[in-house]
Amino acid sequence: MLRAALKSLLGRKVRLLMSTFAIVLGVAFVAGTLVFSDTLNRSFTALFASTVGDVVVRPEGAVNPMGDLSTLTVPAEVAADLERVDGAARVDGNVNATNVVVLDEDDKVVGGFGPPSLGSNWTGAPAGHGLEGLVMTEGRVPDGPEEVALDAGTAEKAGYVVGDTVTLNTAGATATLEPTLVGIADFREGGSLNGATLTIFDTATAQELFLDGADAYSDLWVTAEDGVSQEELRDRVEAELPDGLEAVTGDDAADEAASDLLEAISFLTTFLLIFAGIALVVGAFLIVNTFSILVAQRSRELALLRALGASKRQVLGSVQLEALVLGLLGATLGLGLGVLLAIGLRAVFAQVGLDLSGQSLIFAPRTVLAAYAIGVLVTMAAALLPALRTTRIAPVQALRDDVVLPESSIQRRLQVGVVLVLAGLVSLFAGLGDVVEVPHGGWFVGAGVLAILLGVAAASPVISRPFLVLARVTFARLFGTVGNLAGQNSLRNPRRTTATASALMIGLTLACTMAIVGDSAKASVDKSIEDNFVGDYVVSNVVAGSFSPEVAERMRAVDGVVQVVRQRYTGGTIDGEPQGVVGIDADGAEFLELTAAAGDVTALREGTVLLQETYADDEDLQVGDDLEIEMPAGDQRWEVVGIYEDNPVLFFPIVTTVDTLLATGAQDKDNALIIDVDPASPGVGDRLEEAIADLPIVTVKDQAEFAEEQRAPIDQFVLLIFALLALALVIAVLGIVNTLALSVIERTREVGLLRAIGLSRRQLRWMITLESVVIAVLGAVLGVLLGTFFGIVLMYALRDEGLEVISVPTGQLAVFLALSVLIGVLAAVLPARRAARLDVLRAIATE
Amino acid sequence: MTEIACQVRGLTKTYGTGQAVVRALDDVTLDLLAGEFTAVMGPSGSGKSTLMHCLAALDTATSGQVLVGEQDLTTLDDKALTRLRRDEIGFVFQSFNLVPTLSAEENILLPLAIAGRKPDREWYDAVVDTVGIGDRLRHKPSELSGGQQQRVAVARALVSRPRIVFADEPTGNLDSRSGAEVLDLLRRSADQGQTIVMVTHDPVAASYTDRVVFLADGQVVSELREPTREQVLEVMAGMAG
């Protein structure tokens, strides 16, 4: 029995390999994701170890909620004091800044707009554990305000060599710097800036530029003497520190930095795992289908085995054994492909600056176990249904000419489908919180979507019948006999046709859902901007940060400008929690057209605040109360003069004046300018552009451009999802190829007959292509309908989250449908060619 | 009525090369007259099926000529051969003659539909009437008996008024009564002027024909006109000896 099963497996290797493909892909995604994240986890601490000292001394809460460094500093005398600590070899003060943007010779921003642009001073301090840290690999250390060094990666990307004049944009008091490049720094013992650019100044220049000339540091590195551990040194340093400063070991600081990055990347791994799941579900469909067809084709052979004395169990076992071998094969190939995927991911990450090439891939036993468990279980579970059907083959059927394999009645399929869809609907709405409140709503939504998809797939032989009949009639009318034959073929075995279409349906359902979510999100952004955009132009920093106050001065001087309202974001601490604060010009409240919920929103002046309505309610603050907030310069009490209705233009719920922020220690830089111009002044937009022509990181946008910019991340997100869904479509195409190829084999004699009585090769190819198109379009129609339903339901559930507009991108959905025709045509190429190549004589003679 | 429907000149078909070469047909020369019902007989391996396949544009000869009407089959490419099969030739196979998804009527009209030709309504009615399946035209093949399926196949072969109808053991899978009905049908068609070539090893079937050509080892070895079952058996017995 074992031998018979293996023999039959070998005899069908090509067909089986094709159905394994989905398993291979699914397993590859799982394995690749696991290998990559294991490698990341292991290497991150090592990666960051050379970017921090043994002990780091920094102000508590040094990073504000905007991610900008605050003006909190460590005074220079603390550094001097710490040098006397027992076990401290040396103490170095660092000055760190963000938004020091390097421009190449064409004034393009180096490194794009993703990774941060860092600036710092040069100390030459070694990194923790005696690691070398950043060293000057070329040239010399910068000295004086006219000199800088760059990290090697940035210099290479910008094409700068030592001696060149470098153009920098900064958010400091001077917007543009043009120093000379005197040195290039790099990590020689491993270490990475993760794609960030780094510009290095001498300490005095860095303090002048970023700390308003104060003799202070952003943080200190304390280097341990030999034999002193990081923990010991930290405890000794800690004991000497004044209030407001903290000491952490380099290892802890590295872990912090690593876990921040890991968190950003875990989003990606979750994503990949979800797509692994989709690939496996779609793959399971293909396996059910392939095994169903194979079992049907072999029913006579199986009946013969039964007639020769094989038990039901043995027949069932032989089919399951095939599935087992196939699962093992798929898992092995998937594992291999997964490693390649991990290598590919590593290469992609190296491109964006996270170079892990020094780290070998980590191949944990868990990865192997997961790959085989998933590959084998999914394949065997999928093969179980068709395998169980074999047990209903009676031995006597071996003697009959035409064996018809018993199949579950179509009515039964409809019942199962309806039950699944209903259960799915309940789970979906429960997950969305519309029926009952359940914990972990996301799981309920996912399970509901899956149940509905499976339910529709189960019921599709019944519900698709009208479509298939319509397709036959249409094809017969459009393409004559060939169309009629193709339509009849797709009706011949509706289970097979619809099961094949289901694979495509799943992929397209998800694609349509995402298209609707993306389009609705964009429409919501547009609406929000339309409702709240005031003024004629917005000036902002495309690197998503702040810019020099000089820009506002330049704008005010432009002919035709009526008013410029500055907006800046900074952070304070309320009850120990970091809290973002918006600063605007005092006369800006009126300009922003804030709607008062209480008090007077135009009464904003120094030392007072306006609060967002939701925030004021949450914190139980009224007009006339004082808001207590800890700012860099110390504790403040700001009087609440007005409460405004929620407005998305204001980033944080606390609004005060620019002067108030300046007086309490915030850095003097702006995050946005809102500009009102005189409509009678022609060409004012061009003059605004001209005023900042030397600052490519700062842009002027009107409402349409601003909306465009806000929509861009959504577009990118949707694009990423489409790219991954394309894989599901590839699997679906393979499914169609597989089904058609098996059908052609099954109908070899019929093909021979048709050819014998005069059907040309071209007509035959046409017939199979049309059959394929029916399958693809059926899958697409079901997918688009379901996807539209899921998309609308999802957006409806999210209506309270600021996504109030539901928009269905009909153009995009039409493209999906058109695409499905193409998919059908492509999927038919190989099976059609195979059929056309059949030798007529042999085809007729086939048993 | 001495028009020649099909001329065979020096037809040779070999399989394999060198030592292993097999001559399935060895210099066969034969004329098939229009309106004649010819049986091709011979033991297994005599080349009778190969001969029919070559005549019917299903297989290509190694050397020699096959002329169907004016056209020399050995010079035609696949496209032209397909067209020839479609327009000039009708087929009846031993089994699996019909497309299972189409009704009897659609099956009969299939060659015309493939060619994009309009059926001659009068001729179609006459054919259906002769074949005697007028009440089952809307049925699918699976709903017809074996004999009925073969008669539908004959109707399909006749409906395009081909130059020649080839039948490959058309009664091989039928009981004797159904077989007799099919042979009767072929006989009547021949009487109305249809050229028919039938491969068979059944002497009873051969007795329905005008002429029997006997093949052995790829060569024409004997021929009978207006054969009876007994004559056929006699020749076959002689060949076996």
Image (cartoon, coloured by chain):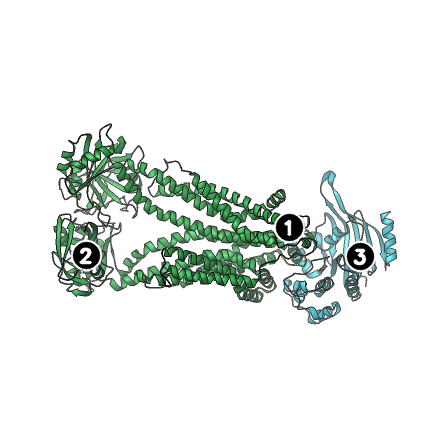
Where does residue A82 sit, x and y in percent of width and height? 16, 34
Left or right of A492, for residue B216: right
Give, as a three-letter code, the residue at label 3: Ala
Q: Which residue is mark 3?
A: B39
1 and 3 marks on the same chain: no
* SS under mark 2: strand
Seen from the viewer's position, the closer of residues B161 and A153 is: A153
Colour of chain B in the rendered structure image: cyan
Q: Are marks 1 and 3 in contact (CB under 8 Å)?
A: no
Label 3 and label 2: CA atoms lie apart by 103 Å
* SS under mark 3: strand
Q: Earlier in the sequence, mark 1 or mark 2?
A: 1
Label 1 and label 3: CA atoms lie apart by 40 Å
- Locate residue A111: give its quadrant: top left
Mark 1 belongs to which subunit? A
Left or right of A125, for residue A633: left
Where does residue A64 sit, x and y in percent of width and height? 21, 48
Q: Which residue is mark 2?
A: A654
Which residue does the image show at 69% across and 71% down from the upper left?
B121
Residue B241 visible in the shown view: yes
Colour of chain A in the rendered structure image: green
- Locate residue A493: give its quadrant: bottom right
Q: Residues within 10 Å of mark 3 (few under 14, many from 20)?
A: many
Q: Which residue is mark 1?
A: A302
